[in-house]
Image (cartoon, grey):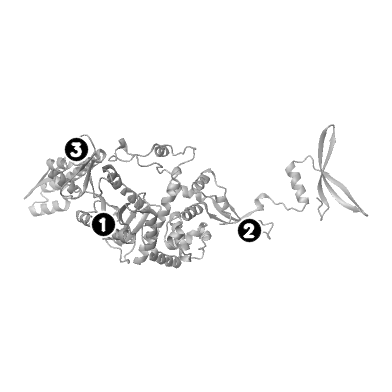
Amino acid sequence: MENKLSGLYVAHIKREYKDKTYTSHLVRRSYRDGKKVKQKTIANISPLPETLREIIAKSLKGEMFVPATEALEITRSRAHGHVAAIKKVYEDLDMDNLISNVSSKERDLVKAMILSRIINAQTKLATTRSWHDSSLAEILNVEDADEDALYSAMDWLLERQPEIEKKLSERHLKEGSLCLYDVSSSYYEGSCCSLASYGHNRDRKKGKAQITYGLMVDTQGRPVSVKVYEGNTTDTKTAADVLEKIKGDFGLKHFVFVGDRAMITHARASELKKHGIDFISALRASSIKKLVESGDLQLSLFDERDLAEIKSPDYENERLIVCKNPYLAQERKKNRQELLKKSEEVFSNLALRVASGRLKEEAKIGQALGRIANKYKMAKHFIFEIGPSKFSYKKNQEKIEHEAALDGIYVIRTSVAASQLEATDVLLSYKRLSLAESAFRTLKGIDIKVRPIHHRLEERVRAHIFLCMLSYYLEWHLRRAWASMLFDDEHPGAHEKNSPVLPAIRSEGALKKVNTKRLDDGSVVHSFRSLLSKLSSVVLNDVRIPAMPKIDSFRVITTPDPTQKKAFDLIGLDIMKEMHP
């Protein structure tokens, strides 16, 4: 206990008096008197608090004490929790081996781009600048990467796309599987890419060139394959390519191809049947009208039910599942009434111009009508009369009523035998196309941000879209793991009145989360984006002790709060073991 420098130490002296033990805490100094070692009491520190006595004792032993505010110095902090969480799920999915069985710098950069796409989707240049604000670049060992390195990794990734998609198909598709396929487009910034062209613009960006891409997902909505096309490519052209990929590259002999009415036309359906490929799709409104006119579809079918199965000679070896959704009927009726009203206002203005004498010639009146007639796609419901200084219009009530009779009616067509799928299962399979639509919303929304696209080279655009698909694949699994903490429905699938024709309804648990904004434990419900933000406040710090410069700096991770710990627990991550990522 003796301090070699000063000879001072704290002695703890015990004595007993009347069956009680008393302890005195004395500061003593040891010294030599000739050949004898003697002790001298300097102070009695017994009245002091125990913690202060311990500090005095340790100080006399040589330990150093500084003010708490000066004891530690944080030299660097990086947002870490969200990076660690996404990285954990990425590794659980074995995505390294999915991308390449061989470790390489390119694979590390692709991993970094996939993770950073979920954390904060940006251009490649902005990505390399911003990922140093988190622990991502450090823990993936890509700190020295620049924009050119990312472009090189994208080129490498694109070469591996066929092999990666084959691995995904082996994971999530099997013989007899449903293959859900849909097409979307995204606008392009600039005019230097050969893929960028003008076509049916789903983003409603007037004057913007675009690219088109087809996405295939499995029955749960996990992406399996994506292909990029020129912006004016038709849906049916892309369908031919994906079918060839499924049969050729993926090696599936039997599967059910699910696509919308624009994807599987009558000619495409005939070709699919010719090659022995089953399909599920829907009929256009004009085709439904023909079924009614031919008598193959009797509207009285819906007097007591909302779903029935019929046959038609025009659809040989096919089943037609006819449905009537009253909510859809109300919506279409409302939309028609609004559009008819707007059309009448336009025609009324033209009638005023003619009546005022500003338009007199029959030809010019006809030209003026031609410019406005189909502004709201309602000209078919009006009867017009044009002459010199004369213009009148009236509703064609018979046509309106004839169209209204079909409101809410839609028809699913399929070549799948009834022994394989019942009528309700066919309908539900078609409705699963909404999973592909959900994927597009995530890809194009605030999460993955496919758009806007800035890459000039055609192959870079293809690599960009594929990279976004892989990011969505990872996010899909993150969302499932965290569903109980998000507004997402943990138990989707129920329908109003147990009818698959009617809209899907949210579970009681999901409705409760929406209404209360709280979980059962009282914590707040998060969106996917807000939960990532919450996790990012778990910070990785580099720490040093100024008073002890010889001691190396060390790392400290923020202790997670209950919400953060729950999120980590749901994906099996003990982040406090990540002291040395």
Q: Which element is circle 1 on? A: helix
Looking at the picture, how far across and down is residue 565, in whole percent?
53, 46
Q: Which element is circle 2 on? A: loop
Looking at the picture, how far across and down is residue 130, in whole percent?
48, 59
Q: How many labels does the image show?
A: 3
Type of amino acid at the residue the image marks with label 1: Asp
Q: Which class describes the residues within 10 Å of circle 2: few (<14), some (14-19), or many (20+)?
A: some
Q: Which class describes the residues within 10 Å of circle 1: few (<14), some (14-19), or many (20+)?
A: many
Of the residues tagged 1 and 2, which is closer to the observer?
1
Q: Residue 406 is drawn in which quadrant?
A: top left
Q: Residue 486 is drawn in which quadrant?
A: top left
Of the residues tagged 2 and 3, which is closer to the observer?
3
Q: Would residue 207 be seen by someone viewing this image from the given angle?
A: no
Type of amino acid at the residue the image marks with label 2: Ser
Q: Which of 92 and 363 is in front in this view?
A: 92
The residue that mark 3 highlights is 301
In-image side of 404 versus 95 (left or right)? left
Mark 3 or mark 1: whose residue is earlier in sequence: 1
Q: Residue 269: which disc?
A: none
The residue that mark 1 highlights is 235
The residue that mark 2 highlights is 553
Q: Residue 152 is drawn in which quadrant?
A: bottom left
